[in-house]
Image (tube, rainbow, N blue to C red):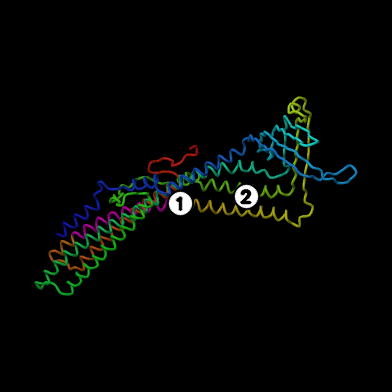
Amino acid sequence: MITLLLFSVVKGYTQQNDRLTMGQVINMARDQSPFSKRAETAKENSYWEYRRFKSDFNPQLRLVGQGPEYNNAFVRTPQPDGSIRFQPVDQINPRLSLELEQPLPWTGGQISVNSNLSYFEQFGGNSSTLWRGSPFNIFLSQPLFAFNPLKWDKKTEPLRYEESKREYVEEVESISREAARRFFDYLDAQINLQIADFNLANNDTIYRIEQGRYNIGTTSRDKLLQVELQLLRSEQAVAQAKLDLETSGLRLRSYIGFNDEQIPRLALPEDIPEFEVNYGEALDYAQRYRSDYLAFQRRKLEAERDVAQARGQIFETTLTATFGLNDSGSDAIDVYSTPQNEQRFNLGFAIPLVTWGRNEARMKSALANQRLQDYTIAQDEQNFEQEILTQVRQFEMLRTQLKISKKSDEVARERYEVAQNRYLIGKIDITNLNIALNEKDEAKRSYISALRDFWTAYYQLRELTLYDFNEKRLLYTPDE
């Protein structure tokens, strides 16, 4: 009876047909989980942020207008002799302008071309009509010795966008790793329930055997009570295993977006890929494709930008120049018939004479922050390389541990079969049988734990390098 029960449980461990695989669970998490939707949304947001940055370098055409501005009031009017009179006005004054603006990313200035037209009409006893406009006007605004944000954005924003694309792939691999972890949480619960059910049936059978032996006087009351206590503990273990299964199932369903109330039984991912991981190769892939390495470059540039910005705030000088054609007349056509030249030039500056150390403090702070960033980035790069080295070495160790755990599981299972047969013929007592049973259960759990550690490390390695060493392919290419 016990042998048949053991055979059914062992068969339940190894039968894989019509079961949900780890690959299927990971694909569900990637395709439909809330976390994958969030990663896709973040990627889309980064794309549109980059598009906005690109548009900052493009010209903009705007139509600017002001509707009829009507004014009927007494206004303060200075007289030639210096006196003041308040005279009534009743007038309307609409304006319209078409403007084309183009930023100059090389210099940080801006050039614009516009055409404008305005209309003025005075009502009442002194009625009059006047049109004024500029058929053509060029305006230049150029800061001198100033910080140029467009120049620095052109350096940092492409890196930031490239980071976001790589971060998306890393996030997908992180989702895969977490899905694998929750897969094993539920698998643990399923196997623990199988073990608990088996142990309950096994201990019930042993209890009946001990009762029979006690009735004929071949065993003691102490051994019978020991078996009964073991049976009660088995019933308690089954109840706890069912609760754990329900809890882990809920966590798995919520993570992968699984809509069915009942998750199918899971298949053990025992097909372990065979491939070699070289530290130098892994580090090379990580340095070329990980978002962190791009972030190191961007952070250095941002520190340099802050120094340039602090330096540019010392002298505030702006050059403005205007050239165009303008005219006025009683009719709109007068503005365009014989327009006159219009030129304007202005150089404004603000040179600090005494700042009580403000400019020096601003520059020193920016330079100190740049040095701090250099030291921090150097340490981060070292930690980056150390993380890759640790992961590669750990991965190979986990592969070895997995082979040992699998062999231990097979040996412990066979030992228990021998022990239970010896118990049935009275060669060993219940204590030794329970020891064999506990070793069998522990070996099974250790094997599942080793599988969990291996597959978690596998997806961790993919996330750290953005390379699949099993399929020998990149998980991301920069031209995507």
Give yes or no for residue 403 being in the magenta stretch: yes
Image: 448 above or below 476: below
The main secondary structure of the magenta stretch is helix
Mark 1 vs 2, N-terminal side: 2
Task: Estimate how packed mark 2 is, as few (under 14), some (14 to 19) or many (20 or more) residues with alpha carbons within 10 Å.
Answer: many
Amino acid at the residue labelled 1: Leu
Give how far across and how far down residue 65 sits, in percent. 67, 37
Give how far across and how far down residue 70 sits, in percent. 71, 40
Residue closer to the observer: 60 or 360: 60
Q: Residue 389 carries which label?
A: 1
Give how far across and how far down residue 401 sits, in percent. 34, 55
Amino acid at the residue labelled 2: Ala
In the current view of this chain or complex, which residue is farthest to the front? 125
Element under disc 2: helix
Asked if the residue at tag 2 contacts the one at tag 1, i.e. Cβ–Cβ closer than 8 Å, the answer is no
In the visual, does 210 lie left or right of 269? Answer: left
Give how far across and how far down residue 165 sits, in percent. 49, 43
Q: Which of marks 1 and 2 is in front?
A: 2
In the current view of this chain or complex, which residue is farthest to the right? 81
Stretch of the chain drawn in magenta = 391-417
- Residue pointed to by mark 2: 303
